[in-house]
Image: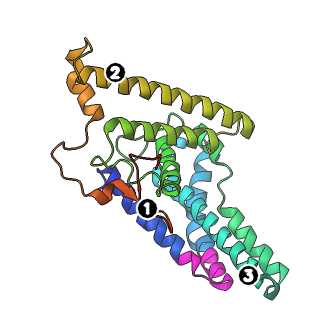
Amino acid sequence: DDSDRGARLQRNFAARQSIESEISKLSVVRLYYLAEFLMERIFPEINESIEDIFRHHVPSQLKSRFLVARRRLHWIGERLEQQLEKCFGSLQRVYFSSKFITSFQNIIHSFKWSSLPGVFSAIQDTASDIPNICAKDCILNEISEELLYKVSNIIPKPFDTKIWSQLGNLLIESVTKKIAIHMFCSSEMSIEERQAKLGRSVLDDAKRYSKLTTRCSTVLDGTATDGNFYDYFFDLLSFKSPQHKVNQKQFFYKRPNKKPRSIYNATK
């Protein structure tokens, strides 16, 4: 169900994990065949569709699925590059000509979306062909998914309303989008300046949500005077259903070769 963001994210995580698993099994030759197929059959239509739109200065005609697909190709290219380096680290490089290696690396380099900051800037106010979402948010959501997938052993099942409160989900969304904007969709400043700006922005989020949590608590325990907003604050802190029985396994994630760790007791 695409309307359930948590379920959609878990489904996409499973797809990413499957892609990584299959790529990790490929030899250099099979990696090349895969990269060549993507380069010849998939990449041209996606890339040209985006480039043509901006070449003719009509970003309003851009279809959001091309933006998502272009970023997904970038992600797959990174996985191919990692596997290639792993294979070459096993001394397979000596069996291939320098021409073959250069050709392969050029294909992988083509998958890198180096023009993303410019595209993101150009579509700031562009509507999307996906209901209730603008074009720039399509990119931010895709990068946020990448980030959350990378830390899925630390932050279990993001946006699952049986585990995370609305307030927790709002914080996850805010922080991941800020990382996406400052570290992937901007090139106006040096990386050090962007990191510093990101750090200040995330710290502001931490302060704001900490104060909001305190406000929720004081309203719910009756010590605050703004009781008229009780339902609003209750919704921010509550899970999908207070009576819903949650299996204990949902509150743990497994780390390789380590015991399950409670997400509500990070000090142990």
Seen in the picture, residue 154 relative to 59 is either above or below; the reply is below
Front tag of 3 and 2: 2
Determine which quarter of the picture holds residue 59: top right
Which disc is residue 13 wearing? Answer: 1
Front tag of 3 and 1: 3
Which disc is residue 90 wearing? Answer: 3
Q: Residue furthest left?
A: 243
Q: Say which residue appears at 19% left-offset and 44% top-offset.
A: 241
- The picture places residue 104, in percent across and down from the top left corner, at 73, 74
- The picture places residue 69, in percent across and down from the top left corner, at 51, 59
Question: Could you say which is closer to the camera, residue 126 or residue 156?
Answer: 156
- The picture places residue 74, in percent across and down from the top left corner, at 60, 60
* Colouring rule applied to residues: rainbow
Is 185 a magenta residue? no
Magenta stretch: give its range.
22-37
- Mark 1 residue type: Phe
Q: Is residue 158 visible to the viewer in this orientation of the structure?
A: yes
Q: Few, some or many C-alpha atoms within 10 Å of disc 1 (few <14, some 14-19, many ≥20)?
A: some
Q: Few, some or many C-alpha atoms within 10 Å of disc 3 (few <14, some 14-19, many ≥20)?
A: few
- Mark 3 residue type: Ser
Q: Alpha carbon of mark 3 to alpha carbon of mark 2: how far?
A: 57 Å
Q: Say which residue appears at 55% left-offset and 60% top-offset.
A: 46
